[in-house]
Image: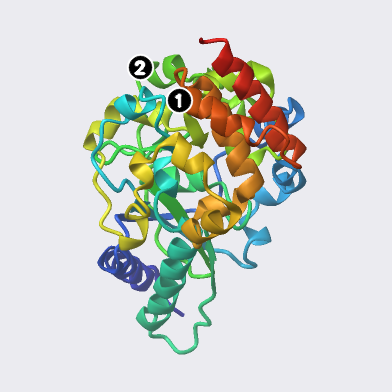
């Protein structure tokens, strides 16, 4: 019988191994998830998840680790920084001829990078657990299952849930990905959850372009620009179009303004380095991409999953929000009879917005 002292030693070795592997932080959580299931159901019932039906369909699975991995005894939480550059992002958002792309999507798709690293981590843990009679099992999670990653990371000591609903870390801000290894090993948990350090700050709430953070710790995803430019499949309502500005894929405003992000570290993960100069690309360059170039540019990128049609329709809205430019109008007119109704509607709106600025 393996005693607690053995698993305490193994837990220390696991945390050290994870950091050696390149994770920026590693912690271990209990399997009792401290999240109010009733409040989550209320959030779903209020339709705050928009058209993301998978959140509703899988809400019962989310709160029981046994649904992720049978006989789960502990959950390893990891943090991996992704900010590729130190930039003046507010300045970029204010450059209306430039495209703003969420910083997490400037490099390769994090799902693949993080999942690969987590599975490697799992195999290393197998070698650390030297007892031949213990049948170690694990499952790596990177948004691939309904795992309450913020609560797990909090319980593992990696940070606290901020008012923008993201995990915040006192020494590293929030520009990072989270992943989990659900395991059947009785590892020694972090003894205390992280303390909340948001205080009276309301910067993230105040800056949100669409007031999607309706109150502290409560995000109405159906108002969020990230939802409209990534998850939503149809036309974007006119009430949101001007507020989108030049944000063509996601939104980072609530992270950019967060005081704790002055401590954020630049990522050393090569997969997250900027590809195709996407950190400083013009809206016109984005709009003039054909389908072939789009697929080539975004091969292996999270952006590719929204598809070419949505990409062009998003960029069209941003062009409508740009300063008046006859070249923009001419480019838009060329696609005003596009066979895609989605593109056509957004293009026609953009033309009217541009012409109104003459």
**In-image side of 16 versus 186 (left or right):** left
Task: Between residue 74 and residue 308, name the one nearer to us.
Answer: 308
Residue at far bottom of view: 132
Q: Against 3, is 84 above or below? A: above
- Categorize mark 1 by other alpha carbons within 10 Å: few (<14), some (14-19), many (20+): many
Q: Are marks 2 and 1 in contact (CB under 8 Å)?
A: yes
Give the x, y percent position of residue 220: 61, 25
Q: Mark 1 points at which residue?
A: 163
**In-image side of 353 versus 128 (left or right):** right
Give the x, y percent position of residue 183: 52, 67
Give the x, y percent position of residue 173: 31, 37
Q: Residue at x 47, y 57 (%)?
A: 297
Q: Which residue is drawn at 45% across and 25% down?
A: 163
Number of marks in the rendered image: 2
Disc 1, SS: loop
Task: Between residue 41 and residue 229, name the one nearer to us.
Answer: 229
Q: Against 325, is 15 above or below? A: below
Inter-mark Cα distance, 2 to 1: 9 Å
Q: Which residue is drawn at 41% across and 24% down?
A: 96
Can residue 218 be seen here? The reply is no
Q: Against 216, is 122 above or below? A: below
Q: Mark 2 points at which residue?
A: 201
Colour mapping used in the image? rainbow
**In-image side of 146 versus 41 (left or right):** left
Quadrant of res 202: top left
Which numbered marker is on residue 205? none
Give the x, y percent position of residue 317: 58, 28
- Categorize mark 2 by other alpha carbons within 10 Å: few (<14), some (14-19), many (20+): few
């Amino acid at each position: 019988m393996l005693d607690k002292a053995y698993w305490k030693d193994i837990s220390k070795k696991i945390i050290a191994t994870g950091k050696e592997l390149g994770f920026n932080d590693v912690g271990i959580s209990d399997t009792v998830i401290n999240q109010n299931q009733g409040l989550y159901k209320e959030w779903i019932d209020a339709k705050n998840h928009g058209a993301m039906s998978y959140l509703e369909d899988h809400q019962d699975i989310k709160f029981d680790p046994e649904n992720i991995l049978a006989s789960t005894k502990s959950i390893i939480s990891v943090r991996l920084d992704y900010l590729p550059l130190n930039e003046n992002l507010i300045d970029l958002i204010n450059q209306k001829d430039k495209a703003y792309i969420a910083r997490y999507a400037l490099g390769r798709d994090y799902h693949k990078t993080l999942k690969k690293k987590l599975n490697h981590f799992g195999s290393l843990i197998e070698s650390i657990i030297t007892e031949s009679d213990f049948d170690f099992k694990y499952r790596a999670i990177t948004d691939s299952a309904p795992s309450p990653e913020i609560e797990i990371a909090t319980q593992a000591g990696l940070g606290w849930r901020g008012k923008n609903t993201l995990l915040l870390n006192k020494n590293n801000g929030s520009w990072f990905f989270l992943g989990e290894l659900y395991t059947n090993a009785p590892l020694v948990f972090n003894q205390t959850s992280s303390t909340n350090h948001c205080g009276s700050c309301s910067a993230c709430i105040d800056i949100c372009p669409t007031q999607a953070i309706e109150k502290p710790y409560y995000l109405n995803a159906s108002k969020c620009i990230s939802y409209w430019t990534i998850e939503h499949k149809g036309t974007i309502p006119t009430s949101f179009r001007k507020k989108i500005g030049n944000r063509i894929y996601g939104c980072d405003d609530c992270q950019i303004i967060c005081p704790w992000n002055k401590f954020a570290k630049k990522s050393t993960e090569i997969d997250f380095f900027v590809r195709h100069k996407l950190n400083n690309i013009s809206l016109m360059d984005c709009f003039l991409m054909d389908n072939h170039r789009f697929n080539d540019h975004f091969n292996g990128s999270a952006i590719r999953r929204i598809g070419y049609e949505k990409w062009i329709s998003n960029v069209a809205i941003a062009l409508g929000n740009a300063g008046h430019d006859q070249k923009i109008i001419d480019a838009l007119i060329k696609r005003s009879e596009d066979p895609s109704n989605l593109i056509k509607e957004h293009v026609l709106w953009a033309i009217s917005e541009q012409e109104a600025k003459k």
